[in-house]
Image (cartoon, helix red, strand yellow):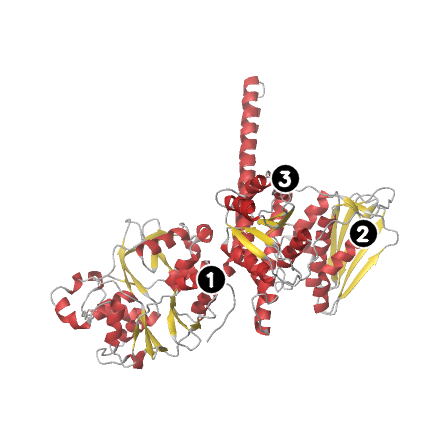
Amino acid sequence: MFTHTSVLTQAEVQSVIINDALVVAANATVMDAISQMSGVRTSCLATTIADSPLDVYIEARSSCVLVVEDNHVLGIFTERDVVRLMAQKLPLQDLKISEVMTYPVITLRSSAFTDIFFALNLLQQYRIRHLPIVDEDDLLVGLVTHESLRQSLGPADVLRLRLVAEVMSSEVICANPETSMIAIAHLMAKHRVGSVVIIQNQKQMETQLEPLPIPVGIITERDLVQFQALNLDLETCPVDAVMSTPIFTVKAEDSLLMAQQIIEQRRIRRVVVTGSQGQLLGIVTQSSLLQTLNPLELYKFTDILKKKILQLEAEKIELLQNRTIQLEQQVNDRKQAEARLTETNQQLAISNEQLASATRHKDEFLANMSHELRTPLNAILGMTEGLQEEVFGNTNEQQKKALQTIEYSATHLLKLINDILDLAKIEAGQVELECAPTSISSLCQASILFIKQQAYKKRLKLNLELAPNLPDLLIDERRIRQVLINLLNNAVKFTPEGGSVTLEVTLELSTNTTTPNNAMRFAVIDTGIGIASEELEKLFQPFVQIDSALNRQYQGTGLGLSLVKRIVGLHGGSIGVSSQVGMGSRFMVYLPCPDVPLSFPEPLPRFVPQLTSITSEAVTTSPLILITEDNEANIITIFSYLKAKGYRLILANNGQEAIALAHSQQPDLILMDIQMPGMDGLEAMKHIRSHPNLVNIPIVALTALAMAGDREKCLEAGANDYLTKPVKLKQLAATIQHFLS
């Protein structure tokens, strides 16, 4: 028996469970079970098929029956079991179901069924297609199948982004139309598959050596169950007389959404994949569609994102090169003609417009992908945080370790997304530095603190060596801290246990043309594995990692050092590296420093919510909070967490509902999502701020929009603060407490 804890509404659970699952007693015969599954009554078989057995079509009722006694599940009998028995040529009339059923049966308690993906993982882990649901007394409640899960999940945008070729199985069991049905049963039993594709070899051209396998029909386990229920002579019956035709096909370059729509509309379990000439390429099943909807598949989106970015960059470069060649040719041929010069300028303007359009499309793509990836990550991280705080109930040590793994993986994915977006924004010139006088000591101590725990786990010695009387630097403190943390994190990752990592800062005058005169030097020094000299020039290239046998064991995205170089370059500085294999590495960052060292006063502290726990006792007045959100997973996450903190909550699914509830309920604070159907969050905030009775209500924009200018848009529309998804629930609670205190 399996248990799991997550959040799912009762209505959602009921929509997935099949309550009228077919059941038989243990003393029933195999033919009784087959009759139930096929919808054919055994009493009428002889007369039904005596004249024309091939003209009878009966839709199968179910792909399995459960063997029960006193409503307790004893075993299960599936279509695959029917195929196996047919292949063994066992007499089925008097064979008891208890002799051939599968037992023990993998089940799931209804109290533990709070997460659809947990049920899906059970099906995939045990390679089964049916999962009985039982109550606390192990009494049968219903049945969960691949099909019921798929219908509840829905395709969403995940299926639009994936191609059939990415998930199709190319290992398809095939047979000729002349093959007997008993031979088909043998093939299914031998290869443990649920279908056999019927093909005809067709020679397309005279010069073609190998004929093309053209699919003409399909036989499934469900077909065999029906044929067995109809008492067809499977020894002599050819497959072309009973195969399902026409078959439903998709192309390898089609989206998975198209495949899912065909499966749903036609009420089938699989579609055949064909090539440009109609030849068989593979097959897509319900199981492969479900796999793409698993949250773990989000990691694959990062590869898609990188490929899309690289593709857009390549297209932009190619367009520029082609246009440049064309314009140069025109200028060289007609440089004396004023009219031709004007034409050339016009062509150049068109090229620039096209390049601007390509860049705009890339930015739109990045913004959309940022939103689509951050939104589910917000739910994953939020639920994880709530479970770790035991907001939804107590968790054992094993569950806590699992939650830590989920949080680490989701945080790693978020870092990758942020790195990609940062790199893209820098390349597009959308990053503006927010420079202010910054204390070097505070900057370095904050950076060291970030990787301190990681270093302690590896028993590394951390050293901070600051030269005396270091002046403040006019820099973007957040960006330079990002540089130092990245370099320190790499040093810790590539340094074996017992080694050391040092952050050294000095002020030096240099005549070297590669570094600015009067520069502040930040050196990150480690005793790690080192880098071969031939690999050093690759370090700062995006999406590139050194490929030595020493560091294949270390994970990474290949974005960090490229991002470091770009940020340092924006400050007018430079970066260098020296390393020796087996001895360690030294990364040096040089930032311009004023000719005369100046000491600036510490900048005024800005409000940063303290991530402290807010208990329900602290919220004694039970403030009313309006949550405006249209994503169900995020609603569940935020609503459950804030409710556990003692707040009163009301919900709006779009901007219009938010305005109406703000007028009628006068909430103490509003959490406002931005991207919503109908009226978006920006327009809703403007309406709210236009009414005198609502103008002083704190509004916190809580959105997955994280591109340049998004924060300013939210604040300009009337928001008091701006938080990007995925947001730490503790941070959200602290922000709420700040405005309500």
Is 263 situated left or right of 588 in this image?
A: left
Q: Position of residue 607 (x, y in %)?
A: 72, 50
Is 207 situated left or right of 666 in this image?
A: left
- Viewer-proximal residue among 19 and 650: 650
For marks 3 and 2 on the same chain, the one whose residue lies earlier in the sequence: 2
Residue type beneath disc 3: Glu
**Alpha-carbon neighbours of circle 1 within 10 Å: few (<14), some, or many (≥20)?**
few
- Viewer-proximal residue among 570 and 115: 115
Distance from the alpha carbon under mark 3 to that under mark 1: 37 Å
SS category of the residue bearing label 2? helix
**Alpha-carbon neighbours of circle 3 within 10 Å: few (<14), some, or many (≥20)?**
few
Distance from the alpha carbon under mark 3 to that under mark 2: 33 Å
Q: Are marks 2 and 1 in contact (CB under 8 Å)?
A: no
Q: Position of residue 421 (x, y in %)?
A: 60, 48
Q: Is residue 625 visible?
A: yes
SS category of the residue bearing label 3? helix
- Viewer-proximal residue among 555 and 363: 363
The mark closer to the camera, 2 or 1, is 1
- Badge 3 is on which residue? 716
Is 102 situated left or right of 414 in this image?
A: left
- Badge 2 is on which residue? 440
Distance from the alpha carbon under mark 2 to that under mark 1: 51 Å
Is 470 situated left or right of 478 in this image?
A: right
Q: How many marks?
A: 3
- Badge 1 is on which residue? 9
For marks 2 and 1 on the same chain, the one whose residue lies earlier in the sequence: 1
Residue furthest left as drawn: 51
Q: Position of residue 394 (x, y in %)?
A: 58, 71
User: Residue 41: which quarter of the image?
Assistant: bottom left
SS category of the residue bearing label 1? loop
| Residue found at x 75% / y 59% | 448
Residue type beneath disc 1: Thr
